[in-house]
Image: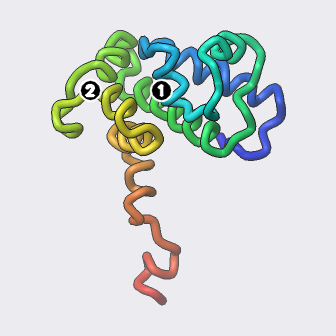
Amino acid sequence: MSMENLNDEERIAVTRTAMAIVDSWKLTGEQILFVLGLPEGTRTRQLAKFRDNTPFPDDPEVMARANHILHIAEALVTAFPKNPPMRHLWMQKPNRRFRRKTPIQVILERGREGLSQVRAELDCTYMWDQSGSVRGDSQAAGGR
């Protein structure tokens, strides 16, 4: 889903879904503010409104982070389709690819970059796109 040009209803749906996901990660209010990249001055009490029917601010940084969060959750469902508890456990378990840190720790330490790293670990197509491996058809065909 492209986060650009969402109508209010779609932004509310994205907001509520992203909030449910970060809530499932058992983050504090302050941690949620950081992970979402909400503007400075946003108070933790505002999070209750986001859980209800107030959309995130129409801010490219916030929407990019929400997009990563939605895709991380989607990739966890793909990785563990019949084992929902494993989706939660994967986020909480130290991972050798993150130097024995948990995915949650990586996100909390690196913000948007951490979200991108966790998403790349779970979603090989996203990692492929990020690596610059995607080329135009003429390059893939040897430049002909």
- Looking at the picture, which amino acid does disc 1 mark? Ala
- Is 100 left, or right, of 120 in this rendering? left
Q: Which residue sits at x=17%, y=37%?
A: 99
Q: Residues within 10 Å of mark 2 (few under 14, many from 20)?
A: many
Residue 34 position in % (x across, y down): 50, 29
- Is 40 left, or right, of 93 in this rendering? right
Residue placed most toward the observer, 123 or 22: 22
Query: Relative to 47, does residue 126 appear above or below in the rendering?
Result: below
Query: Relative to 95, does residue 4 appear above or below in the rendering?
Result: below
Q: Quadrant of residue 70?
A: top right
Residue 123 shows in this picture: no
Quadrant of the snapshot with the N terminus: top right
Residue where numbered disc 2 is placed: 102
Residue placed most toward the observer, 136 or 59: 59
Q: Are marks 2 and 1 in contact (CB under 8 Å)?
A: no
Residue where numbered disc 1 is placed: 73
- Looking at the picture, which amino acid does disc 2 mark? Thr
Q: Residues within 10 Å of mark 1 (few under 14, many from 20)?
A: some
- Is 14 left, or right, of 65 in this rendering? right
